[in-house]
Image (cartoon, grey):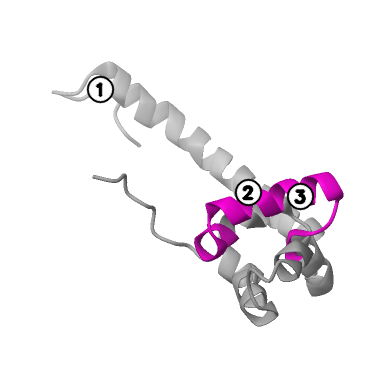
Amino acid sequence: MLPLRSRGRPASAERFRADHCPQSLQEHHALRNGCLTLAERCVNGITVNRERLRAMVENSIGVVRALNPHIGYANATEVAQEALVSGRSVYELVLEKKLLSKERLDEILRPEVLTRPRPLLTSRE
């Protein structure tokens, strides 16, 4: 057990260590148990519906950001606006306008590629 006060240390530091550490330990255990319960009851057993995920990616206007380096800002903006107005998918419009081949578009829009960490761009000097 820690002494309530010792030389060279303020009383508030000793009170924190003596009074709050057991409480923090209890909170840690409660949080850990909550996480384990959540995993057991809600997370374990979840599987990926790859077809649905692919359709969501293809129909998202936000994927134009990933296409921007490949088709250019002007084309990406045009495709995004047309997709928004027409309700058609970005994927479909890029193929129709022959901005990319189907193979290249499929490679760029793979979820693994879209979610891969990349270095942050630095400001231009």
Identify the amino acid type marked 2. Thr
- Measured in 3D between alpha carbons, the distance from the residue under mark 1 to the one under mark 2, in whole angstroms, is 67 Å
Give the image location of residue 15, x and y in percent. Answer: 36, 22
In which quadrant will I find the C terminus? top left
- Measured in 3D between alpha carbons, the distance from the residue under mark 1 to the one under mark 3, in whole angstroms, is 71 Å
Look at the numbered disc 2 and give the secondary structure of its residue: helix
Main SS class of the magenta portion in the image = helix
- Identify residue for label 1: 5
- Identify residue for label 2: 77
Instruction: Give residue 14's quadrant in the image.
Output: top left
- Identify residue for label 3: 82
Q: Which portion, as a residue range, is magenta? A: 67-91
Above or below: residue 96 compared with residue 64: below
Look at the numbered disc 3 and give the secondary structure of its residue: helix
- Residue 46 seen from this side: no
State yes or no: residue 68 in magenta: yes
Q: Residue at x 68, y 56 (%)?
A: 36
Left/right of residue 119 with respect to residue 68 in the rendered view: left
